[in-house]
Amino acid sequence: MKWNTIKYLCKEGILGLWKNRLMALASAGTIILCLLILGISYSIAENIETVMKQVEEQIGISAYIRDNVDGARLVAVENIINSTEHVSEVNYISKEEALETFANGQEDNSLFEQFKNDNPLPASFEIKVEAMQYQEDIVKKLQNIPELQVEYFKNESIIFMSINHSIQLLSSILIGCLIVIALLLITNTIKLTVYVRRKEINIMKYLGATDTFIRLPFVIEGILIGMIGSLIPIWIIKEGYLIFMDFVGEALGSFMGGIEMVPIGTIMQGLLPMFALIGIGIGMLGSAIAIRKHLKV
C-alpha cells in the first residue's frame, strides 16, 4: 500500500470519527468509565497492600536483655541480631530510655525520678523484620541466645498475615473481574458503532474497495477512541489521587510511627501500560474484529 493511500485512509479515519462523533463519544465514554473504575480499584488495592506491609514492619520483636551482661557481650549480641537473615533494623533501648518512655506515658510525671536509681525495666533490642512471615524463624534463632528473653505478638501476627493474604487474593480477583468486564463492554460498544455504519461499509464493498482499504479507517478510529478513553481517566485518577493524599496523608503519617501512601508516580507506572493496552489495544482490535463480518458481502 502506497504512502499517499495510507495518509488518505488515516485522514478518513479522523474525519469518520468526527462525522460519527456521537457513537464515538459513546464508545469513549464506555472506555472512560470502565478504566476509571478499574484505576480506582487498582489504586486502592496497591495502597492496602503497601499499608499492610508497613504495618508488618512496625509489628516487630522485643528481645529483652538479661541483667549483668557486659558491654562487649552486648555488642556481640547486637552484631548477631543484625546479621540474622531477614532482620531489617535493630534498635537498642537502654534501661534509662525504657523508664523514660514508660514514665512519659503515665499521668504521674515523678515516676522517672522515683525509679531512676532502682530501675526495674530491662534494656532491650527492638527488632524489625522484612516481612511478617519471617518473624517466627527469627524468634527461634534469637531464643538460642542465652542473654535474651524474646517476646513477640505471635497470635496477632498469624491473624494479621491471614487478613493480609485474604485482602491480596480478593484484590487480585476483583481487578481481574473488572478487566474482563471492561474488555467485554468496550468491545461490544465498538461493535455497535460499526453496526450503525454497516450500510457505508456495504456500499464501499460494492464499489470494489479492498477489505484493507475499508478496515483501516475504522481501526484508526478505534485507536483514537482508545487514546481518548485512556487519557481522560488517567488525568482524573491522577488529580483525584493527589487531592486524596492531601486529606489522608497527614492522618496516616501520625499512625503507628508514620504510614505512607503509594507515591503517585508508582501508581501511574502501573496504570499507564495497563490503560494503553486495554484502551488503545481493544479500540484497535475491537474495530478490526467488528468490521470483519460486514466485509462478507
Image: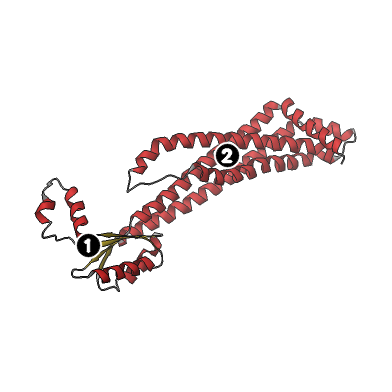
The label shown at residue 123 is: 1
From this view, report whether residue 216 is shown above or below residue 167. Answer: above
The label shown at residue 205 is: none
Q: Is residue 235 left or right of residue 120?
A: right
Estimate the spatial distance between the alpha carbons at disc 2 and disc 1, rounded to whole Å: 54 Å
Q: Are marks 2 and 1 in contact (CB under 8 Å)?
A: no
From this view, report whether residue 164 is shown above or below residue 2. Answer: below
Q: Which-is-in-front pick, marks 2 and 1?
A: 1
Give the secondary structure at mark 2.
helix
The amino acid type, in three-letter code, at marker 1 is Ala
Closer-to-camera residue (203/56)? 56
Residue 273 pos. (x, y %): 61, 45
Residue at position x 52%, y 43% in the image:
265
The amino acid type, in three-letter code, at marker 2 is Leu
Residue placed under numbered mark 2 in the picture = 35
Residue 60 pos. (x, y %): 32, 58
